[in-house]
Image (cartoon, rainbow, N blue to C red):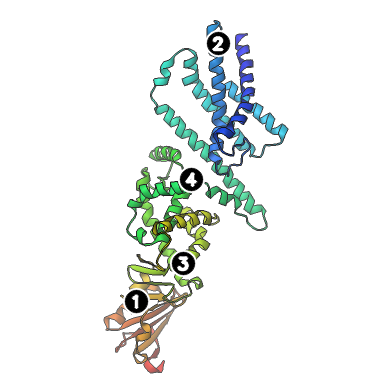
Amino acid sequence: MPQTCWLILYIAFGCAAVPIVRRYGPLSIGNYALESQYDSDNGRANVMYRMLSPVVVCSAFILLASALATVFGLPLAADSWVSVLAYWLAMLVVKLCNRTMTQPVLAFVAEAVASCTVAALFGAYVVGPLAQGETDVLNSSGIALEVEVAFFGVLAQAISAAIVRRQYHIDISSASEPSLGYCVGYFGAYVSESKLFGYERKYAKLLPPRYRQDTLLRSIFFTVMSIEDYNRPAAYRILERVACKFGMAKTTGIMQQRSDEPLSDEESVTLAAGYVGRMWDAFLRAFARSGKGGYGPSAIRFGRDWYECDYEEVKEALLEFGADLYGDYCGSRVLDVRPVLERVIAFEEGYSYGLLPSTVLAVGEICARETNWLGDGEFYWANGHEVAAADASKIEESKRHLISLEHAAGAEVGDMCDAIRAGGGVVLSVKHVDGVLAEVAFSGDVLPPLGKWRLVGSGSSR
């Protein structure tokens, strides 16, 4: 009979917790609602509150009831997680009656199971011993608690992120025109100025000098960091490093770099610096070869190990095509990263008070193959397939030659350019589409051995 009384009492505790949780949620979390969307700015905090609050409230009721039972010499409580289960069943009834079940059923069940699991652990290791008068439990080692908190943070993030992604995919697949509203809200939650200052203080010193020279490169790096940090918060990364030791995770650290060994946040930043740098090289190369760059040395010009580009033009292109660039990192090109990117760029520009030079001049090999063909000097893309020397117009027409080869491979172009320079000539431009056609313009007094190449024009005969 006493056990039955406790069971009835537990159910009453669970039902009583519903209005208490609903009432005090707004005081502890801004814009709190039991039916809050997962992609709101406080999505994770809402999820964690919904799962933890019934455990806390029900445990408080049970400890109070246990204290009274001890005073009156009554048997103590049994499994306390039952009251939390009663809470979630009562919450389900409330949601169904009020038609406020806006979240997927699977998410609701996941929250309920997680909440009951934590309640069972809390009851076994804290509430139960306290009810028995064993206050030593409060002085126990904190390792178990730390792991539980980390696990709970990960679980809350996983539920929130999974539902946001599902909402986003449903949104773009069912609409006649894709809407990125979910994505914008999803990414807008974690690019606060204090967060960016924290990234700068902790990680900027790990980046190569090039990142200090190119504000836009630095901006895309910290944009990636912001997104990855949100997708894998600190609590998640703790468990991820443990999982990596057992081969259960391949990407670790704040930048989610792939490694057979678990990476610290700092180690992942060091690895990602090179990766993002190569992404940026590919983006600048694509910009220079596109009509967006306008063709010519004013947009982008480059040498063997440096480049100079118009800041505003490249910035505009980065904002327009940032999702595609981020796709090189995460493998998805449909996410709208522009709101994050805009805020990060504005933050980085603030270090120069917004008084930036009109061009960026930085270390980098954005067109390594082409500069190997042309040699030393300054170059630019004359069109989508032709790279030219900046001073080619200064060469006398009588000294110019043009040769071509159909179905030419890149190696054949390189060999011919080496032969031209070996004969004292200067390569002026190279037009090449791999396996289709190559045309090389050069100046010199002596023609190199042509072999399969055809002389198109030479001097005034061109």
In the image, what residue occupies the spot 62% across and 53% down? 172
Given the image, on which type of amino acid does mark 2 rest?
Leu
Given the image, on which type of amino acid does mark 3 rest?
Glu
Of mark 1 and mark 2, the one earlier in the sequence is: 2
* Location of mark 2 (residue): 68
Of mark 3 and mark 1, the one earlier in the sequence is: 3
Of mark 4 and mark 1, the one earlier in the sequence is: 4
* Number of residues whose C-alpha sits closer than 10 Å to that of mark 4, classed few (under 14), some (14–19) or many (20 or more): some
Q: Are marks 1 and 2 in contact (CB under 8 Å)?
A: no
Under tag 2, what secondary structure?
helix
Asked if residue 452 shows in the view, the reply is no
- Please tell me how many numbered marks the rendered image carries: 4
Given the image, on which type of amino acid does mark 4 rest?
Tyr
Identify which residue, 387 or 314, lies in the foreground.
Answer: 314
* Location of mark 3 (residue): 312
Under tag 3, what secondary structure?
helix
Q: x, y percentage for residue 221?
A: 42, 55
- Report how far apart the C-alphas of labels 3 and 1 lie in the structure: 28 Å
* Location of mark 4 (residue): 230
Q: x, y percentage for residue 327?
A: 49, 56
Q: Is residue 303 above or below residue 448?
A: above
Of the residues tagged 1 and 2, which is closer to the observer? Answer: 2
- Report how far apart the C-alphas of labels 1 and 2 lie in the structure: 89 Å
Of mark 2 and mark 4, the one earlier in the sequence is: 2
- Report how far apart the C-alphas of labels 4 and 1 lie in the structure: 44 Å
Numbered label attached to residue 175:
none
Of the residues tagged 3 and 1, which is closer to the observer? Answer: 3
